[in-house]
Amino acid sequence: MTLKFYNSLTKKKEVFTPLHEGYVTMYVCGPTVYDHPHLGHAKSYVSFDVIVRYLRYIGYKVRYVQNITDVGHLTDNADTGEDKILKRAQREHREPAELVEIYTRSYFEDMDALNNVRPDISPRATAHIPEQIELVERLIEKGYAYVSNGSVYFDVQKFKEYGKLSGRKQEELEAGARIEINPEKINPSDFALWKKAAPGHIMRWKSPWGEGFPGWHLECSAMSMKYLGQTLDIHGGGLENTFPHHECEIAQSEAANERPFVRYWIHNNMVTVNGQKMGKSLGNFVTLKEAFKSYHPLTIRFFILTSHYRSPLDYSNDALDAANKGLERLLNTVKSLRERIAKAKDGFSPDEIYEKLEHYKKMFLDAMDEDINTPGAIAALFDLSKEVNTLVNSGQEISKKCLEDIDKLYQELGEDILGIIEPKPKTLTTTFTLSWQVEDKTTEDIMKVLIDTRNELRKAKQWQLSDFIRTKLSEIGIVLDDRPDGTTWKKIK
RNA sequence: GGCGGCUUCGCCAAGUGGACUAAGGCCACGGUUUGCAAAACCGUUAUCCUGGGUUCGAAUCCCAGAGCCGCCUCCA
């Protein structure tokens, strides 16, 4: 059992060994909180959530840091254009701090609904201005940065390894006609560490270079260094941030610290809609709050995990419907298992069942070890469920202990690692129920009366009346399930 | 123009040169079970974009071509 990650820096799958035994430092680029989170955020943060959960499962102590960008992210590129937060705040007639608060809350609300574990630290860029200023000062001292008209730029030519992550060469970048010529810069590909604030710019801080605000790339370097040290085990983020964002982070951090910044770079792929990248500029992005109107958050989580994190994921209603059915199938099995446990007695625990449990557990963990192959892991869960369904439906006497051990495996794999089997899903932003969710006591009691009545009718072979009850219930979304050991019911959407 | 990636069953999607006569899910069809259903189970459906090559052996490696996509402005 050896965990491997595909490292974007080396472009190879590598065995994972943290810098300090048993302890993992992990930083993931967080959202810029100027709008509600969308499906792209979901894919990214669900993917990294599973990585964190898995690292913890295999015994690592993980410190997981994910920033909240609340300043410095400009609309056009890293050094020109308007600040996204500021622009949106003006549009909504709000204080920037107020706007940031609204969308930060929205972000956490949706991430909670997706059943992501919260990062250990969610540092805000604006709360780390001194750290960022200090980093800029160090870069100036070391000769990697220069002041120009109240702004500070990183001198890319001084950092010879610039381009090592994205595979870009300096000459090519300069040839790229899309970088606007900025007369303040020595070199067109130099990037801003600190920007001078224009007179009307309300987000501003005092600095040795006058009033201004930090550049977008800077916060990640400053905050990861503060909370995780100068060399991180894992840095995650979206593929589209490889260049320039992560390339600039490497330059700043390694120039300042003179040691490797990140040992494993992990990048997740994009969400597409009809095969096209989902993007703000294309206007085809789907917010999670919108998506949650049509699908349960856990369905979306499951959907994300049915493809590999490094593959693009195409969003469509057909794909989501299929995912929903698949998830329901898995949950049904666990539900039946737990109903069976409630009725089970002590008794025989066959060895062959334990052998099977070990077999599927190994299949699952082997898949996870191979660069977090969640589709493979889920396949193992389906294979396991086939066996469990057969067992549960067989009527064979199985000890309570044995059934509980099966359930324990579902908890480990499906709940602890994948986070898709969740007895109490948080549905803050949706009214959806997955079929196995627990209803209130009164509903349960009424259903019991109805089911008992219908079963009396069935005993008396009064099929017309018993089918009438079933049909009427199905019309309001309640499905009855007559099994050898009794009738159960569930609510479908 | 530069850099990178993808193309596997009707759809989605794994696949770590040899146990791939290719996982798993959805859909469809047949069957078992059921009073009838539902659920569940069993069965049926691919030689891996095309053409070369390397190898005892390739979906997996190399070359060429076709198509699609991403990055090189902001985006997870």
Image (cartoon, rainbow, N blue to C red):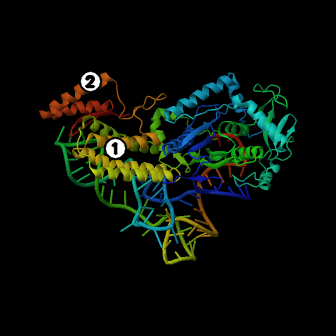
| Amino acid found under the numbered disc labelled 1 | Ile
In terms of secondary structure, where does tag 2 sit? helix
- Classify 10 Å Cα crowding around label 1: few (below 14), some (14-19), many (20 and above): many
Q: Residue B44: percent from the left, percent from the top?
A: 32, 61
Residue pointed to by mark 1: A406
Q: Is residue A11 visible?
A: yes
Please report, as a chain letter, where disc 2 is located: A
- Which residue is depicted at the point 24% across and 27% down? A448
Quarter of the picture holding the C terminus of chain A: top left
Q: Which residue is mark 2?
A: A446
On screen, residue A275 above or below A201 = below
Residue A87 in which image quadrant? top right
Tell me the amino acid under the disc marked 2: Ile
Residue displayed at 53% across by 29% down: A109
> Mark number for residue A30?
none
Looking at the image, is mark 2 or mark 1 earlier in the sequence? 1
